[in-house]
Image (cartoon, rainbow, N blue to C red):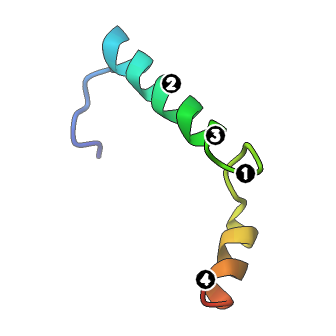
Amino acid sequence: MPRNPQPLSEAETGWMKAIYTQLLRDTPMNRLGTPEEIAADLAAGW
């Protein structure tokens, strides 16, 4: 169950989009890693 079952406001939606856009911009491959990529990094001790 979500902590806040209320839908996001327009301001919250805009904030989330801005954070996601910044995250992708600051990530070398401009995308999030796949579960397999993340698991490989964790296994390698990254």
Marker count (numbered):
4
Of pointers 4 and 1, the one earlier in the residue sequence: 1
Residue 17 location (% of width, % of height): 50, 24
Circle 1/circle 2 CB separation < 8 Å: no
- Of marks 4 and 2, the one in the foreground: 4
Q: Residue at x 61, y 82 (%)?
A: 46
Residue for badge 1: 28
Residue 45 location (% of width, % of height): 60, 90
Q: CA distance from mark 1 to mark 3?
A: 8 Å
- The kind of secondary structure element at disc 1 is loop
Q: Which mark is residue 24?
A: 3
Q: Is residue 22 above or below residue 43?
A: above
- The kind of secondary structure element at disc 3 is helix
Q: CA distance from mark 3 to mark 4?
A: 20 Å
Residue for badge 4: 46
Circle 4/circle 2 CB separation < 8 Å: no
Please state which of residues 38 and 28 is positioned toward the viewer in this rendering: 28
- Local crowd at mark 3 within 10 Å, few (<14), some, or many (≥20)? few
Of pointers 4 and 2, the one earlier in the residue sequence: 2
